[in-house]
Image (cartoon, rainbow, N blue to C red):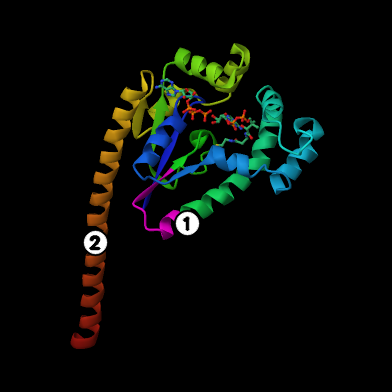
Amino acid sequence: MYLIGLTGGIASGKSTVSKRLAEFGCPIIDADLIAREVVEPGKPAWRKIKETFGADVFFPDGQLDRKQLGEIVFSDENKRNQLNTITHREIAKVMILAILKCFASGCQFAVLDVPLLFETKRWLSVVSKVVVVTCDDQTQLDRLMNRDDFSIEEAQKRINVQMPLAEKCKRATHIIDNSKDIKYLNSQVNDLVKQFQKSYEQWKIRSVLLSGLGMFIFTSIYLYNTLVK
Ligand SMILES: CC(C)(COP(=O)(O)OP(=O)(O)OC[C@H]1O[C@@H](n2cnc3c(N)ncnc32)[C@H](O)[C@@H]1O)[C@@H](O)C(=O)NCCC(=O)NCCS
Ligand SMILES: Nc1ncnc2c1ncn2[C@@H]1O[C@H](COP(=O)(O)OP(=O)(O)OP(=O)(O)O)[C@@H](O)[C@H]1O
């Protein structure tokens, strides 16, 4: 099995791409979904957020007030770093278990959907490909404002704290241009899946050849030591 990193900028279309990949049966390990799980009431990250940010960022039922906490951390780098320190370790633990589960199930490849793949760097050493979902700045801003009902200021603040999309594209092995309609996006995802399946077949052939070579060398050494020496 090999791992594929999926990233982009906020509202560039990562979730839309990962939904399409899931339709092909690709296992998706979604850091954003896991980030929501680890801050559920009573969990370690929930307690640390309460200690650090106080009761103001929670609803009476104990659920995190994501909008309130978002306004705080996307306006203050130190507070954002505090939240990252609290949550990223917990997110990583869940992701590792999810990767092991995928490996055990024998799937061909798994997709790590990580918005901050390049910012946190944590997963770059384990992914063999990085897909960046990009779009032009105005489209990104418009989609974020429409989806989350943000003012232009709130949306821009969230875009500005991440590595610029152009920079992420320079580090990508594959780029999906999501500046047009969903049909255009899906045609690129379809091609990507074909490429991944081809890479997996090539990887499988290489693995069989390498293990065969390993067996040949081991057997030759064994026979030499047993019969010749
Ligand atoms: C600040 C929070 C509460 C805001 O919640 P909200 O529901 O408004 O946003 P959501 O979690 O859906 O994230 C939306 C997008 O914001 C961006 N984003 C989220 N957290 C961060 C961060 N710490 N730094 C930069 N961008 C971020 C990502 O592009 C993400 O896809 C939430 O984003 C959070 O808990 N962030 C810390 C955990 C984290 O870093 N998640 C990203 C996983 S790689
Ligand atoms: N090609 C497209 N045409 C029109 N709308 C789109 C397109 N791609 C995505 N969208 C919409 O733009 C918004 C952002 O897309 P999406 O949620 O997939 O981005 P994301 O990168 O996962 O965001 P986040 O970083 O917040 O997780 C969503 O409302 C989505 O429906």
* Position of residue 28 in the picture relative to residue 210 (left or right): right
Q: Give the x, y percent position of residue 138.
A: 47, 12
Question: Compared with residue 101, is residue 57 higher up or lower down, i.e. above or below?
Answer: above
In this view, 93 is above or below 168: below
- Residue type indicated by callout 1: Leu
**First along the sequence among labels 2 and 1:** 1
Q: Which residue is mark 2?
A: 208
Classify mark 1: residues with Cα within 10 Å, few (<14), some (14-19) or many (20+): few
Residue 194, x across and y down, in percent = 26, 40
On residue 100, the disc is 1
Residue 108 lies in the magenta-colored region: yes
Front tag of 2 and 1: 1
Q: 158 above or below 218?
A: above
> Where is the C terminus found, in terms of image quarters?
bottom left
What percent of the width, then of the height, locates residue 146?
53, 17
**Disc 2 element:** helix
Looking at the image, residue 56 sits to the left or right of residue 112; the answer is right
Identity of the residue drawn at 30% across and 39% down: 193
